[in-house]
Image (cartoon, rainbow, N blue to C red):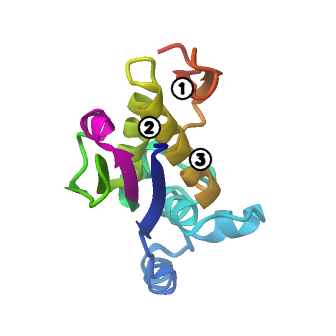
Amino acid sequence: MKPEAIIICRTEVDASTFLGIALRVLGHSPSAAADASGRTMSDAARFISYLAAMRDPKAKVELSPKLLAHVSYSLLMVVDGVDVLPIMECASNMPFVSVETTMRNVWLLVVTGTLLQWKIAVIAGSSLDVDSSVRFLFNKIQGLFQEEGVNPWTDYRQRPAPDQVTYLLEDKRGH
């Protein structure tokens, strides 16, 4: 069975309240750089850029690694029973709920974490150290976040895994 994953919960930001108060107390709008960029951004990416601009109005409009812990996501996963433990080891820094389903050896998981925690989990799950079915799931999770408009893996490159189905994530900086 191929594992499945879907984002079921994401951080919701009350941007109008946040920006209204920030403008009054900071004297500048943390949204100015993001608005001026003309880029289409997810709510999470936009919020992270607002946080960066709170301290520095000229901050780059990007997913600052220092601010990834300010947005969170819950994913629903359907996985083979043999993969539950390796998946949870990759995501060991996140809370989860798991249960065996009525289908033989199939588990349902809900895992919740910050974008920083998901970045770490996807890197761990996209390595040679895990079975290809686990790597398949974490490759899929990375794709879900990219579709969501958040990509904290820009400092990593994809390299085909030996199974020729999945890929490995390698640090571009050589770490």
Residue corresponding to mark 3: 143
- Residue at mark 2 to residue at mark 3: CA–CA distance: 10 Å
Residue 131, position as x, y percentages in the image: 41, 24
Q: Nearer the viewer, residue 34 or 42?
A: 42
- Residue 122: which disc? 2
- Residue kind at label 3, given as amino acid type: Gly
- Residue kind at label 2, given as amino acid type: Val
For disc 1, the neighbor class at 10 Å (few under 14, some 14 to 19, many from 20) is many
Q: Mark 3 or mark 1: which comes first in sequence?
A: 3
* Quarter holding residue 36: bottom right
Tell me: residue 137, above or below residue 70: above
Q: Which residues are magenta?
A: 76-91
- Residue 54: which disc? none
Whether pointer 1 and pointer 2 mark residues with C-beta atoms closer than 8 Å, the reply is yes
- Residue at mark 1 to residue at mark 2: CA–CA distance: 9 Å
Whether residue 163 is in magenta: the answer is: no
Q: Which element type, helix, strand or loop, lies under badge 3?
A: helix
